[in-house]
Image (tube, rainbow, N blue to C red):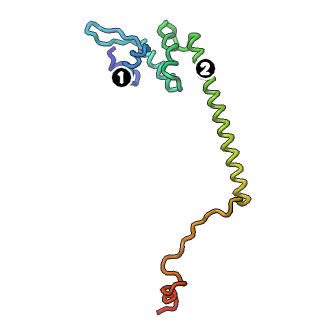
Amino acid sequence: MRIGELAKRAGTTTRTLRYYESRGLLTVARDAHGHRTFGEDDLRVLRQIRTLRENGFELEETRPFVECLRAGHPAGDSCPDSLEVYRRKLAELDACMAELRSVRDEVAGRLARAEVEAAAGSPHGPEPRCELSPPGPSPDTPQGRQGAEGP
């Protein structure tokens, strides 16, 4: 198949395919006219890359999976190097989750303290209020007293 058809079937762009080719993730055969040609194996490689990228893997992290498929394995994650990438990614995700839990605990603690202070009356004085005067002249002004006395 030609590059446009592969891009369409893989849900990507020809530009992306050329980029993957330049990075060595996609091998390209050429026909007699010099046009790029691709097969179903290339589509499997692209689907593997896309799945990994959608799950937060960097492009270079997909390389062991691509190489595993190219070696003839039925799945890109059935090789030792691919399994090692999974292990590193899980460790990275665990670290991120621990950091997020720490931040969450800090925010929850601040909220709890703020709610206790608000319920007990803030030590910073009363809450600011916006009080609006009624429209028209004030009864304390001469114009207001005239209006209050009637016509």
Question: Please, is residue 59 above or below residue 68 in the view?
Answer: below
Three-letter amino acid code at disc 1?
A: Arg
Q: Earlier in the sequence, mark 1 or mark 2?
A: 1
Up the image or down, 112 lies above or below 43; here it is: below
Most foreground residue, 23 or 1 = 23
How far across and how far down the image is residue 9, in percent?
38, 21
Instruction: Give the residue type that dot 2 points to.
Output: Arg
Q: Which residue is mark 1?
A: 15
Q: Residue 112, which numbered label?
A: none
Residue carrying label 2: 88
Q: On the picture, is 112 further left or further right than 23?
A: right
Residue contact between numbered discs 1 and 2, judged by CB atoms under 8 Å:
no
Question: In the rendered view, would you say 74 is above or below 106?
Answer: above
**From the viewer's perspective, is residue 71 above or below residue 8?**
above
Q: Position of residue 71 (x, y in %)?
A: 49, 6
Crowding near the residue tagged with mark 1, few <14, some 14–19, many ≥20 C-alpha atoms within 10 Å = few
Label 1: state its secondary structure. Answer: helix
Residue farthest toward the bottom in the current orientation of the protein: 151
Q: Residue at x 52, y 81 (%)?
A: 138
Horizontal side of residue 128 vs 40, given as left or right: right
Residue occupying image coordinates x 33% and y 14%:
1
Q: Quadrant of residue 6?
A: top left
Residue 145, percent across and down? 52, 88
Residue at 41 percent across and 14 percent down: it is: 26
Instruction: Tell whether 5 sits left or right of 97.
Output: left
Q: Residue at x 68, y 42 (%)?
A: 106
Relative to the observer, which residue lies in front, 108 or 144? 144
Q: CA distance from mark 1 to mark 2?
A: 30 Å
Secondary structure state at the residue bearing disc 2: helix
Q: Callout 2: 10 Å neighbours few (<14), some, many (20+)?
A: few
Q: Give the left or right position of residue 19, taking residue 132 as reference.
A: left
Q: Image quarter for residue 119?
A: bottom right
